[in-house]
Image (tube, rainbow, N blue to C red):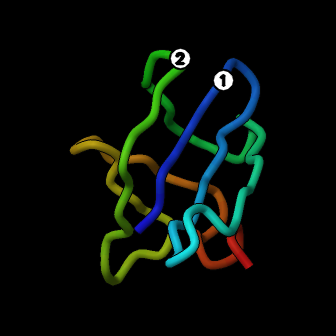
Amino acid sequence: GYIILCNQRLLFIHEKGTGGFDKILEIPYDRVQEYGFPEPNRLSITQKEGNTNEIVVAGSTLFLKMSLKELIP
């Protein structure tokens, strides 16, 4: 799964691997269409099947302008 961290400017998405967090990505806010979480925050996220641009963050839906696969190489 993924863990998301945020500050006032960026989203930090971590992909959790066997050795802890092995990928870190900084996503500028202009790549996120809807973002309604207070900062700082740390939330588990999952990707909805069938729509690669839609993820669920702690029960809330977050729509990305790019697919999660594009954002996380």
The kind of residue tagged 2 is Glu
Q: Which residue corresponds to the image point at 27% horizontal and 43% vertical from the top-left?
A: 58
Taking the view exactly as shown, the residue that stands out farthest to the left is 59
Residue 51: x and y in percent read 40, 75
Q: Which residue corresponds to the image point at 52% horizontal and 46% vertical from the top-left?
A: 4
Quadrant location of the C terminus in the rendered image: bottom right
User: How many labels sit on residues?
Assistant: 2
Image check: 41 left or right of 58? Answer: right
Q: Which residue is mark 2?
A: 39
Image check: 18 left or right of 65? Answer: left
Judged from the image, the secondary structure of the residue bearing numbered disc 2 is loop
Residue 27: x and y in percent read 74, 47
Rate crowding at label 2 as few (under 14), some (14 to 19) or many (20 or more) other CA atoms within 10 Å. few
Judged from the image, the secondary structure of the residue bearing numbered disc 1 is loop
Rate crowding at label 1 as few (under 14), some (14 to 19) or many (20 or more) other CA atoms within 10 Å. some
Q: Which residue corresponds to the image point at 47% horizontal and 26% vertical from the top-left?
A: 41
Which callout, 2 or 1, points at the residue further toward the start of the chain? 1
**Mark 2 in CB contact with mark 1 (< 8 angstroms):** yes
Of residues 29 and 39, which is closer to you in this image?
39
Image check: 12 left or right of 56? Answer: right
Q: Which residue is mark 1?
A: 7
Calculate the distance from the C-alpha at mark 2 to the C-alpha at mark 1: 6 Å
